[in-house]
Image (spheres, helix red, strand yellow):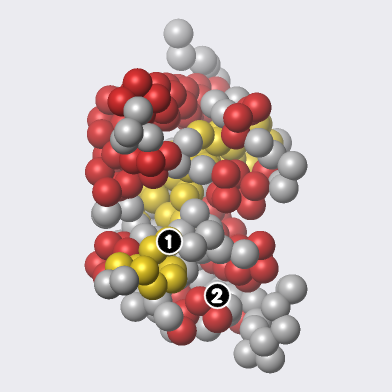
Amino acid sequence: MDNQDPEWSAARPFVPATRDIVEMRRAAAACKGCPLYRDATQTVFGQGAVPAGIMLIGEQPGDQEDRQGLPFVGPAGDVLARALEAAGIARDAVYVTNVVKHFKWEPRGKRRIHKTPRLSEIKACMPWTDAEIEAVGPRVIVCLGATAARALLGSAFRITRSRGEVFPRPGAAAIVATWHPSAVLRAHDDPAQARQLFEQLTDDLRSAARYAGDATNAKKGHRSR
């Protein structure tokens, strides 16, 4: 780790041996694997169907997620819900989480503004994400945004070059990277761009669902048409 704080330690010691998602969520509530827990209201663990064919992984909780203790319940969550609906995917049929489980922020007046997590903080939290992947057993993982994509696909990955491309992995879930829903929100001053980003996000979710369905049918010995 690149953080010299003597209290810094990876999250691995806090991750239980069980892959029962309820027990994992309970254990994560006490995680102090990196300094981010100090300024966060609470751990924001993943939520959704277990098992699930599709697992969505974002960057970190936002202000509303930190307050409510649930992933993607703020403005970006609203965008994600609309994109899932447009793609024909039921929200309760997928599992949603973040690569970092605590809200990293800085004050700006009375507001708490998102601050991008450091690589060391992402690495510290990865044991939780790895455990969630094992528990959920997805056929395809959708990385929402660059932070999640680089955490799973490597630091050289660029969404602008490889967005929507399916990366099959033998014996493991395939990975697709797309825009984070917050990118749609940030484009609010340019309606045309916001619409394009939303359509691309929806298309990528639809492709992930199609791939997950094909993978299921392949296991049954046939492919969907």
Q: Estimate how packed mark 2 is, as few (under 14), some (14 to 19) or many (20 or more) residues with alpha carbons within 10 Å.
A: many
| Residue nearest the observer in this picture, 212 or 222 | 212
Q: Estimate how packed mark 1 is, as few (under 14), some (14 to 19) or many (20 or more) residues with alpha carbons within 10 Å.
A: some
Name the residue at 31% across, 71% down. 109
**Residue at the limit of the structure toward the top, as seen here:** 225
Name the residue at 49% across, 54% down. 59
* Left or right of 114 on screen, residue 121: right
**Residue at the limit of the structure toward the bottom, as seen here:** 6
Name the residue at 51% across, 15% down. 223
Q: Which residue is mark 1?
A: 114
Q: How many marks?
A: 2
Separation of marks 1 and 2 at Cα, in angstroms: 26 Å
| Residue nearest the observer in this picture, 202 or 206 | 202
* Camera sees residue 218: yes
| Residue nearest the observer in this picture, 193 or 145 | 193
Which amino acid type corresponds to the residue marked 2 in the rendered image?
Val
| Residue nearest the observer in this picture, 158 or 91 | 158
Q: Position of residue 140 (x, y in %)?
A: 52, 37
Q: Which residue is mark 2?
A: 15
Name the residue at 29% across, 39% down. 79
- 208 vs 115: above or below: above
Which amino acid type corresponds to the residue marked 1 in the rendered image?
His
Q: Earlier in the sequence, mark 1 or mark 2?
A: 2
Q: Position of residue 120 (x, y in %)?
A: 67, 68
* Image quarter hosting the N terminus: bottom right
Q: Secondary structure at mark 2?
A: loop
Q: Position of residue 164 (x, y in %)?
A: 54, 26
Q: Secondary structure at mark 1?
A: strand
